[in-house]
Amino acid sequence: MATARAHDGDEIYFEVHGDGPAVLLYNADPRPPDHPLRDRMTAFTEAVVAELADRYRVVLMSYPGAPKPDTFTPAAVNADMLAIADAAGAERFAWWGYSFGGVAGLQLALSSERVTALAMTGFPPLDGPYEEMLRYSELLASVETDALGAPIPESARAQLPQFATYYRALRGFDDRAAQQRLTIPRMCFVGGADRIVAGEDEITHLGDTVRAHEAELSALGWEVEVLPGLDHLGASEADVVVPRLSRFLDRHLPVR
């Protein structure tokens, strides 16, 4: 069983499929937890491996693992991702993440020259709603469904406080100033109807945010797409993500 050691000493399970340029996939858990969408998660992971593993070294991870409510900061998550990459033999690697995985990927790309390409999907790279997501993370303890609209199992509630810790550490982060530090290939797509809600309250509208900055992001070097009519769950489906990710990687990563 392949594992890497997290910053808190926890063992992070990961899998490697295929060979070629390395790609770390944050939202493709090879051992998804108990969740109403578990079967969907498994099918997604199978689809992305089937598409990419013939020419890429695909690294899957079961992360965060044990809850890390006091230590789950951007710096700690970055260190954990590099530990996984080291254990997987990936000196340099592309990144794909959706929603929080996109946020984590941006922070990793800004902190490490080992990232070769960034697919930050399901979250705005510019004018990101970090304060709103902090409030959302704090509210999750009192609502019944998550950002994908799925019921939150009691077993998953222990994971929620760590995300508030992460977003709290990003207070003061200026994603506009950060753009000049990004020179690697980068892609963002989001559902045009992607709005984050807590109960009946809308926290933020991710689709509108990306749409408002679409031209500016393109001028900054991002490949941007707003997908009409898709919500947070819809824009994370395999038939949406996998072909776009595959084309992005094929455009930018040299394959032997």
Image (spheres, rainbow, N blue to C red):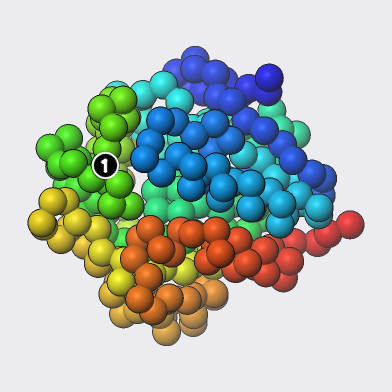
**Residue that badge 1 annotates:** 151
For image coordinates 30% across by 47% down, the residue present is 150
For image coordinates 38% across by 36% down, the residue present is 35
Direction top: furthest residue: 9
Report x, y in % for residue 163.
Answer: 30, 38
Q: Is residue 31 above or below residue 253?
A: above
Residue 191 falls in image quadrant: bottom left
Q: Is residue 220 visible?
A: no
Report x, y in % for residue 92.
Answer: 71, 46
Report x, y in % for residue 154.
Answer: 25, 27
Amino acid type of the residue tagged 1 in the rendering: Pro
Residue 256 falls in image quadrant: bottom right
For image coordinates 10% across by 56% down, the residue present is 200
| Quarter containing the N terminus | top right
For image coordinates 23% across by 45% down, the residue present is 145
Viewer-closest of 113 and 95: 95
Q: Is residue 4 above or below residue 165?
A: above
Say left or right for 151 vs 67: left
Does dot 1 land on a helix, a strand or a loop?
loop
Say left or right for 160 vs 54: left
Q: Crowdedness of circle 1 by 10 Å Cα count: few (<14), some, many (20+)?
A: some
Viewer-closest of 61 and 178: 61
Direction right: furthest residue: 256
Report x, y in % for residue 126.
Answer: 37, 67
Say left or right for 10 vs 229: right
Q: Is residue 101 visible?
A: yes
